[in-house]
Amino acid sequence: MRYKRLPRTFFDRPTVTVAQELLGKTLVFQNHRGRITETEAYIGQDDPACHAARGLTPRTKPMFGPPGFSYIYFIYGMYFCLNIVTEEQGFPAAVLIRGLLHEDGTHYNGPGKLCRALGLTKEQNEIDMITSKELYVLDTPAWTDFDATPRIGIKQGLDKYWRFVVRKEVLQPQKNSVKSLS
């Protein structure tokens, strides 16, 4: 069965909703594809953990752009992290892609490991994931059996349960069927 790409309207919605509904969708980058297993929501300048909390900067510019664009940044001097911009243009919000079940059965749990394995770098920052031929998301069935927890690797905003993780038992039977979702 062939799945369509997610439209811009999917990303032009509340960030927490998008973060939850991305679970199970298929991320495609060049010759890699895998189902999203973990996300985190970052919402606006009132969210102290959001990069945009300090306002518009050259780094955060993509977050203020249209929904459905990639926002990739470099952290700890060694990792790239993939986010997808959400909500209306001008309002800085994005979903961090933290985990992926690759079509080869490998599970990447961590945004840095995920980007390294797929080869995502700053070169893919600000790509329109709705029209791009190299980086996009397919509308495969969502996984709705997940846990909500505080976000990881932050010091502020820990009261927000905006990290969403597919339960392990959901992933086990899926390992052999990821290839058939293209």
Image (spheres, grey):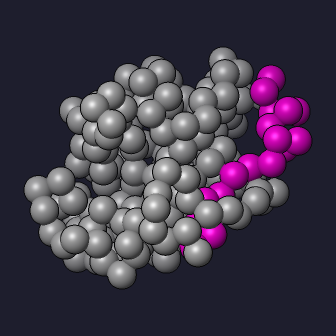
* Residue 164 on the magenta span: yes
Q: Name the residue: 61% across, 35% down.
A: 109
Q: Is residue 102 visible?
A: yes
Give the residues drawn in magenta, as a range. 160-176
- Front residue of 92 and 28: 92
Which residue sits furthest left?
58
Q: Name the residue: 39% across, 43% down.
A: 82
Q: Is residue 127 visible?
A: no
- 87 vs 97, left or right, is left
* Residue 31 on the magenta span: no
Exactly how many numbered labels are in the figure?
Answer: 0
Q: Quadrant of residue 138?
A: top right
Q: Quadrant of the C terminus?
A: top right
- Image coords of residue 2 (percent x, y): 62, 38
Q: Quadrant of residue 156?
A: bottom left
Which residue sits furthest bottom?
46
- Image coords of residue 105 (percent x, y): 71, 21
Q: Quadrant of residue 119?
A: top left
- Front residue of 87 and 61: 61
- Front residue of 127 and 160: 160
- Image coords of residue 121 (percent x, y): 29, 31
